Amino acid sequence: MDEIKITTTLDTSGKCCPMPMVETNKAIKNLAVGDVLEIIATDVGTRKDIPSWCERMGQTLLSTTERDKVLRYYVRKER
Amino acid sequence: MKSLSIVVRDDAYDKILTPLAFAYLTASEGTQVDMLFVNWAVKALTAEGAANLHIDGRHADDEAKVRAGVAKAGLPTEIYDVIKALKSTGKVNFYACSLAAAIFGVDETNLIPEAAGIVGAAWFLNDKAAKAEHYQYF
């Protein structure tokens, strides 16, 4: 993960659908193109929600990790 | 998805959460959402009615647990507060069905300001539902 420079972290731990996606949409709007958003989530629904959201919104999912039921997504803003 | 129309019929606290959550989710992505509240659900578009929504039937005893779960999920526990949050996206319109309004006691004096108005179902079905990219009924 050292090569990914995180611009902002959004921690949605404990929250469930729709809030992780609602907050992700808000967070990405405040970033500049090229910035990287780290999303921390515990809602297992995000395993599919975040990758499909990235594809739909034209953002790049750089990496995903999961440890001790905590998911981390690294999304680069493209547009 | 560019547009979504939702008709909400059921006014039980737990059952009204899903269409509101779907609206919140899609509106946050920029989807235009139009919601028509029919039958008992029209009461949710009044402050008093929204405050008095409860879980019905065999799940009624679980209301406190459900509300705790809603809070944990990050949503407001009061339906009116959820409606306000959706309205703040600028992407959700709430309409009261005129027939339901007449039957269940909703008029322009008690309609919440977040609602776009009391409308005929023909207008909603033709000008909103039929033209929306996706349509749902709850």
Image (spheres, grey):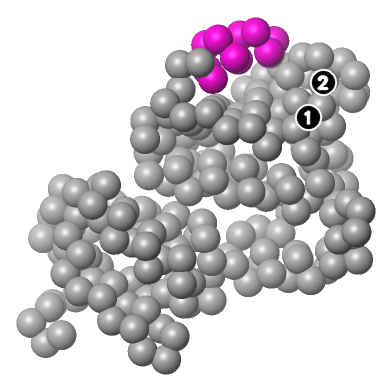
Residue visible at 46% across and 22% down in the picture: B132
Kindly report the distance in space between the C-alpha atoms of the residues bearing marks 1 and 2.
6 Å
How many residues crowd mark 2 within 10 Å: few (<14), some (14–19), many (20+)? many
Say the numbered circle drawn on residue A48.
Answer: none
The image quadrant that residue B45 belongs to is top right
Residue visible at 48% across and 72% down in the picture: A43
Residue A54: percent from the left, percent from the top? 25, 55
Q: Is residue B10 shown above or below B124?
A: below
The region drawn magenta spans B120-129
- Quarter holding the N terminus of chain B? top left
Residue visible at 25% across and 47% down in the picture: A57
Q: Nearer the viewer, residue B72 or B137?
A: B137
Say the numbered circle drawn on residue B42.
Answer: 1
Q: Amino acid at mark 1?
A: Val
Please name the residue that numbered disc 2 is placed on.
B100
State yes or no: discs 1 and 2 in contact (Cβ < 8 Å). Answer: yes
Residue visible at 13% across and 53% down in the picture: A78
